[in-house]
Image (cartoon, grey):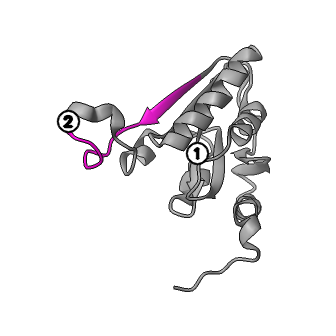
Amino acid sequence: MTRLFNDPARFTDDMIEGFAAAHPEHVRAVPGGVVRARPTRAGKVAVLTGGGSGHYPAFCGVVGPGFADGSVIGDVFTSPSAARARSVAEAAEAGGGVLFLFGNYAGDVMNFGLAARQLEGDGIPARCFAVTDDIASAPAGQTARRRGIAGGFVVF
């Protein structure tokens, strides 16, 4: 398989910069991801999504009018850090708090949850919602263990 990138260590940052440069009318790059090109409306809850890059870098693509207010981007197959989540949240937050939407993966649950607790500690209301639509990843009696796969896009 052919891969095209400059420096593997900068893959995620290069992807974010390139996406923002290609779509400046919709997004702007911030440390850790992207937010809407225009600021979130005052008092609105900032809806943020995110996850690792590589297998699902489309998180940036759900940011814009009528969609998410920001997207937190992790490295290839790696959940974004709490620091990245907090950075994007602070850039998108406009007085109404933050709602993080993500797949039910251990790293995402841990890091978005930590960022939400840190924001709460700073007086910014923050909540997390893990998408658990994948019926193949856990049986009916263990729905809380299900991961978010295809249905995540519809939720976002």
Who comes first in sequence, dot 1 or dot 2? 1
Q: Which x, y percent locates residue 120?
A: 69, 17
**Residue 50, which numbered label?**
1
Residue at position x 21%, y 32% in the image: 141
Q: Which residues are magenta?
A: 127-139
Residue found at the very far bottom of the displayed protein:
2
Q: Which x, y percent locates residue 13?
A: 75, 60
Amino acid type, mark 2: Ala
Compared to residue 126, the image places residue 11 above or below, namely below
**Residue 70, which numbered label?**
none
Report whether residue 44 is seen: no
Q: Which x, y percent locates residue 124?
A: 71, 18
The answer for how far apart the CA atoms under marks 1 and 2 are is 26 Å
Q: Residues within 10 Å of mark 2 (few under 14, many from 20)?
A: few
Residue at position x 52%, y 58% in the image: 56
Dividing the picture into quadrants, the one containing residue 6 is bottom right
Compared to residue 94, the image places residue 57 above or below, namely below
Identify the residue position indicated by label 2 in the image.
Answer: 140
The kind of secondary structure element at disc 1 is strand
Amino acid type, mark 1: Gly
Residue at position x 51%, y 62% in the image: 55
Q: Main secondary structure of the magenta part?
A: loop
The kind of secondary structure element at disc 2 is helix
Please state if 135 lies on the left or on the right of 148 as rendered. left
Q: Is residue 63 magenta?
A: no
Please state if 124 lies on the left or on the right of 104 as rendered. right
Please state if 120 lies on the left or on the right of 106 as rendered. right
